Amino acid sequence: MRRMFSVVIILLVIALSHGPMILGQDLRNNSEPAKQTAELSPQEAALRTAASQYEIIDVLLAEGRYVEAIDEFAVIVNLGLESEHEILVVQAAWDFAVFLREKDQFETAHKIIDQALDFTLGSESRYSLLMMRGMTFKDQGRYDLAIQALREAKRLSVQIGAQEEISRTRVPQ
């Protein structure tokens, strides 16, 4: 129950920090059939590929094919999604890591988290992934590494807060 509460809080923070445009948006609902393939922009095509990959990974995880899932997640990371879609990659990594933690597949969870961390640039995204890394280490009983990851997330959180404060106090010229 406590784990679920932590997940909900962190996802809420991410959603609110990225604005209402991402609420309800995930990799799964980027597969609408309305546009013809020839009309798709490269980014739309990448999002559709990511949606397909998400479902492939979901099936592989359900079947216990964890090593294959890592390779398939790398496809999402390497699609060249624009930074505005970074949150979708983070959400996918979060979903898969939660599932893997529940199955005691900690190393696979770490590999997916690491791939997502290599992809992300945004502080909020990195914060969320570091939190997941810390929780995964904690579940493993690797408490020193958990504390290290959680402290790194805390540092990022303080930096994010300081940047937001600076942004609020700047006077437009």
Image (cartoon, rainbow, N blue to C red):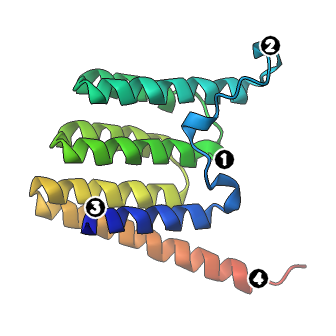
Please report whichever mark, 2 or 3, sits nearer to the chain's N-terminal start: 2
Judge from the rendering whether residue 61 lies leftward or rightward of residue 119; answer left or right: left
- The type of residue carrying mark 4 is Arg
Whole-percent x, y for residue 22 in the image:
64, 53
**Mark drawn on residue 84:** 1
What is the C-alpha distance between the residues marked 2 and 1?
A: 23 Å
Query: Can you tell which of label 2 and label 3 is closer to the viewer?
Result: 2
Residue at figure coordinates x 29%, y 54% from the top left:
133
Label 4 near label 1: C-beta < 8 Å?
Answer: no
Q: Dot 2 corresponds to which residue? A: 38
* Mark 4 burial class by Cα count in 10 Å: few <14, some 14-19, many 20+: few
Please provide percent x and percent y for residue 110. Answer: 26, 43
In this figure, which residue is indicated by the disc labeled 4? 170
Q: Dividing the picture into quarters, in which one does residue 20 lie?
A: bottom right
Q: Quick one: label 1 or label 4, which is nearer the N terminus?
A: 1
The answer to whether residue 75 is above or below residue 13 is above
Q: Residues within 10 Å of mark 3 (few under 14, many from 20)?
A: many
Label 3 belongs to which residue?
149
